[in-house]
Amino acid sequence: MWCVTELRNYLYNRRMIKSVRFDFPIISIGNLSVGGTGKSPHTEHLLQLLLYTHQVATLSRGYGRKSVGFKVVQANSLATEVGDEPLMFKQKHPDALITVGEDRVDAIPEILQMKPDLDVILLDDAYQHRGVRPGLSILLTTYKYPFYKDELFPVGQLRESKANYKRADILVVTQCPAKLPPVEKQNIIVQLKPQPHQKVYFTTYHYGQLYSLYDFNWKYDLHKDTIVLLLCGIANPHELMQQIQQQVTTVHLRQFADHHTYDLHDMDSIRETWSHIGDKKKVLITTEKDAVRLLPHRDWLLANKIEVVIQPIQVKFLFNEGEQFDNDVINYIVWEKNQTIA
């Protein structure tokens, strides 16, 4: 597979296959690896940054959906129709235009026709999609497994060779320790070898207030003696696992594949695990991305008296550089729009 990707990149780099460049602000968020870099919370950070000052839309492939073609995500859509991440974005930000479409070259004009006053489109997980050339490309890589230490799949987790990081405008090292030493920051930058045009940022996770799957306004607090069943269908649950282990004595992990669609067999299996982890105070914690895939089973979970709460995850920029990153994004949008006017 990587041979095909490298051939495609060669043809694009040599302009033997041409990318479409829209005269409109388009921001791509992606990675070189097969997943687990924190793409969802970083995309949501951009949504939160822009939503109240700009007309913004997101375009995702809608990984895991059973439908095809271009679709506008509604708050009552199903994850099987539009994908879990786009549905999560829509439910959390109902005023945003959230869309899915595997052919981004065709989808972007549809979005612009649908919303002529749009200011920017966010392309989610589009680093390998060379058909569209974004005006601003943001590449994510993790602190523990940065691309310069990784290998091509199947030996490692890279979808394409390390050298392709040079296409990005901004590099973000994600999932860092909250107190990353400045000397280690500099060491990582040296190993990243950023190009003259590239900026480098570092982020960590901020874990928000737990809230109930059954009532989003109902908040939940953990106690040391609470028994936790952590249910995750995400690429990398270990950071969340460590966060919860710092708050309670006992955590049981039920891990499913990333984007896994929960069926009744899974529910029976989860109920079996739930019944065996103890009779004391217990709770099932899941992610916001998993929650949209559990919602179709809400009544079943209630009937089986399984207390389900959701852990929101946000990104926090280290070294007080969050404002600088935000300004880079907003300044790009202003510049792109001025180019179009000119």
Image: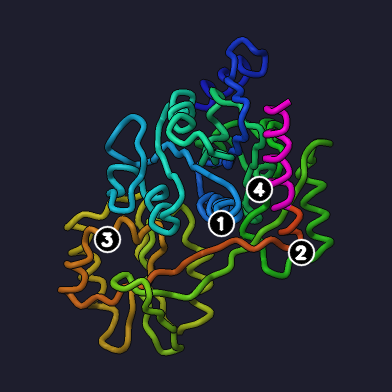
- Residue in front for this viewpoint, 243 or 326: 326
**Which is nearer the N-term, disc 1 or disc 3?**
1
Residue at image mark 3: 295
Q: Residue furthest top?
A: 16
Q: Quadrant of residue 48?
A: bottom right
Q: Secondary structure at mark 1?
A: helix
Q: Examine the structure image and report whether residue 330 is included in the region drawn in magenta.
A: yes
Tell me where the magenta segment starts and ends, as one range.
325-342
| Residue pictured at 42% horizontal, 36% vertical | 61
The rendered magenta stretch, by its main secondary structure, is classed as: helix
The percent coordinates of residue 292 (x first, y second) are 33, 57
Residue at image mark 2: 320
Q: Nearer the viewer, mark 1 or mark 4?
A: 1
Q: Secondary structure at mark 4?
A: loop
Residue 248 is left or right of residue 274, and the answer is right
**Which is nearer the N-term, disc 1 or disc 2?**
1
